Image (tube, grey):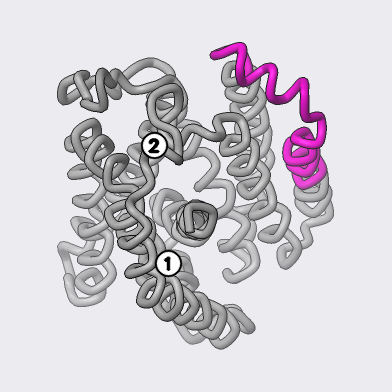
Amino acid sequence: MMLFWSGALALSILLYVLLDGFDLGVGMLFALAPDERGRRQMLASIQPVWDGNETWLICAATILFGAFPMVFALLLAAFYVPLIAMLGGLILRGMAFEFRERAGSVRWIWDAGFIGGSWVAAFVQGAAVGALVKGLPIAHGVYVGGAFGWLSPFSVLCGVGLCIGYAMIGCCWIAGKGASDVRALAFRLLPGLIIALLVFLACVFVDALSLDLAVMQRWTDRPVLYVFPLVGVVAFAVLARAVQRRQANRLFAPAALIFVAAFGTLALSFLPFIIPWSVTIAQAIAPDASLWFMFWGIGLVFMPATLIFTVIIYFVFGRNSPRADDL
């Protein structure tokens, strides 16, 4: 059960970062749309899937609450302020989806909310990851860092880095979905975003290895772990080549693979810790009775149903790009 729920949590977080990541990226790029028709195209490209993407955030939170209650309590205590900011940003995005079409002369307010909510949510997620990598101030199983104990130059850097990553994968999405003007915007932005993300990930990887001798020893003893960084490098190369050849429909897969490689590298660097340097998976796991109780509902029904729903949604709405003439 411990292995099952650890895998389920990792899968939920990865799918959320991948799926909601690109639609947050589209929101971050919204201000750069060439005109109102371009903005409509960008919204149409994510409108069928954005709310389903956020389901994986709920799934991850549910697994933390039920299977890793100690971690859930510690993360809430540490990240009250950024979590409220993130939820506010996500709520504002959802409101903007519904209200901007009927807003008339004040549409710019909802556009600003959509853009700002996307940036805030993306930055907060990256900053939280950076704070976890550096290690939260925890003593005797209790968070002791205060409301802003998570905030540091490194967490801010990680917040900016994730914004870059989301913007990049958002560009890859709209390049394959938009008309010529939106596609041109994506191709114009992608080279700079790819270089910036590559530099950021390389710096974070080196910094993570230097944080603790145990991390360095793990990578030294198990060279097979370098598969994930190597996969990431290959994915960057494939993505750069697709950008160079302006192959709009071949951008998203390597961009997604970059995120998978980065996630795998990060997770393997800190196992068996679920909160680096403070709490291991074995220490945080709930009693077997709770895990089995959750399994019959979430593990056996809810997660498979959500996976099937996600596949169907992307199959139905992902086959054809929105046509500019219809928007």
Q: Is residue 316 visible?
A: yes
The C terminus appears in which quarter of the rendering?
A: bottom left
Query: Where, by quadrant of the figure, is residue 215 drawn?
Result: top right
| Left or right of 181 on screen, residue 195 | right
Q: Determine which residue is flagged by label 2.
A: 283
> Residue at image x 29%, y 21%?
151
Point 20% across, 71% down: residue: 99
Q: Name the dominant secondary structure of the magenta segment.
A: helix
Q: For residue 234, which quarter of the picture? A: top right
Q: Secondary structure at mark 2?
A: helix
Q: CA distance from mark 1 to mark 2?
A: 30 Å
- Residue found 66% across the figure and 52% down from its top: 255
Picture coordinates of residue 76 (x, y %)? Answer: 22, 40
**Over which residues does the magenta segment extend?**
209-236
- Would residue 324 be visible to someone looking at this image? no
Instruction: Identify the amino acid type marked 1.
Output: Asn
What's the residue type where badge 2 is placed?
Answer: Gln
Q: Is residue 267 magenta?
A: no
Q: Is residue 226 magenta?
A: yes
CB contact under 8 Å: marks 1 and 2: no
Q: Quadrant of residue 148?
A: top left
| Residue 145 coordinates in the image, percent (x, y) | 21, 19
Q: Residues within 10 Å of mark 1 (few under 14, many from 20)?
A: many
- Which residue is the site of mark 1? 53
Q: Is residue 194 above or below residue 12?
A: above
Task: Return the residue nearer the eye: 237 or 154.
Answer: 154
- Residue 6 in the image: state x and y as whole percent: 49, 52
In the image, residue 141 lies at what x, y percent? 26, 27
